[in-house]
Image (cartoon, rainbow, N blue to C red):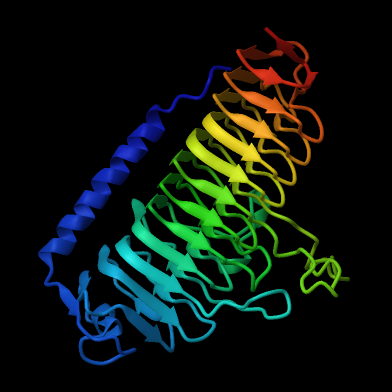
Amino acid sequence: MTRPTRTALAASAAAFVAALALGAGNALAAAPAIVTSDADSGAGSLREALESGATLIRINPAVQTITIDSALSYGGTEPLRIYGNGTTISASGDFTVLELSAGASLRANRLVLEGPGGFDFDNAGTGKGLFIQVPNEATGSVNVELIDVTVRNVANHGIHVSDCTLGDDCGAGSGGGGDGSPASINMTLRGVTVDNAGYGKFDADGVRVDERADGGIVFFATGSVFSNNGADGVELDEGNDGDVHIEIWRSDFTDNGGYCLPAPLDVTEPCVEDDDGDLILDLDDGIDIDEAGDGSITGSITVSKVADNLDEGFDFDEEGEGGMSMDFVRIEGTGNGDEAIKMSAAGAGDVHAEVINSVIMGNGNDGTEFEVEDGDGQVHIRIGGSVIEMNDSEGVAAAQENETDPGTIRIRASTVDELDLENVEEI
């Protein structure tokens, strides 16, 4: 099987950019609302602007901090644009800061969305930073573009886009259940920080995208930081047919996944499984991508760091018919509890990966792991100009079930201290 083509996904990315431009045009055609008050409600407030039907909102530079006593909500379906000036929107309690309840596309810049913080296993919560609920009848794409936005100190997901009827109960992969719309979800983050989210609820991520039915996910991030979140720094969950394509540049994924660590120190294993199996001891990743059904995972991660996450650094799983093709270029992968890079395909598809000019050291299991668990798929790996050593187990583990057509690994100008190969040949 050949390496999965990115033509269709490139077309998706182009459509994403076009959709954003169209949304911008619609917003500019509407009368803008100007936020002149830092009050929770009333004349000139952000709440009034969101409820007015305006699709373009500008916040006056004099309005620096807006403290709210309940969630802000936009119920329109037209694309929404919010221009801040480093404005902080601060929730006085445990509730979602900003919600788009009808699946509208969003472009926002120079905003801080923050909760009250102080959440842990014994101080649970449900509030999110930004929540977009996609209705079942949605078509086309839901586009989210955030520029110079910070989300912090919320109990639940920092940023959550849900195209899933089960809401927060929408689990990962094909077993996660739920239904959704035919729409795709496209997200781009430029200069975004998501910090200290997800410490008030089990399995709450810095960024979470739930996509069900036939749509796909396109995710871009540049100059962004995802750190100190209770579950995954970023989780992209494509639970049925559809592709996941990512492009990440100069971004950091650090210290994520620690919600189930003993805290306070006199409590041991706070997330143990109970009699009903509802809670488990679970540590999470820098980035977790789950794709089920017919579809592929493709993309690249460049000049980025994945470090000190409690489980894997990059954890990519493909459950259905489809392949995986990823480039990792100038990656620093250190100190993760499990592999720095893990790519696993369980269906009929190949795993292709390139690791170029990267440093993978000091991780808790293998430095990197690539596998096709069943079927006729093959593993093909190329490593160049990289250092993969001093991990707790092998530097590279690569395995496939297909014995007839061996996979390949090619290593050039690199230091790799140990290989564990099964039906994969070094060339």
Res 134 seen here:
no
Please name the residue shown 29% across and 86% down the image: 38
Q: Residue furthest bottom?
A: 42
- The percent position of residue 30, horizontal first and vertical second, equals 13, 68
Q: Residue furthest top?
A: 427
Task: Tell me where residue 156 sits by quadrant.
Answer: bottom right
- The percent position of residue 185, horizontal first and vertical second, equals 42, 52
Please name the residue shown 75% across and 64% down the image: 260
Task: Tell me where residue 392 sits by quadrant.
Answer: top right
Please name the residue shown 78% across and 74% down the image: 264
Please name the residue shown 47% across and 86% down the image: 92
- Side (left or right) of 359 relative to 16: right
Compared to residue 65, the image places residue 279 above or below, namely above
Q: Residue furthest right?
A: 275
- The percent position of residue 113, horizontal first and vertical second, equals 42, 71
- Side (left or right) of 90 relative to 275: left
Quadrant location of the C terminus in the rendered image: top right
Res 54 seen here:
yes
- Side (left or right) of 361 relative to 34: right
- The percent position of residue 72, horizontal first and vertical second, equals 38, 80
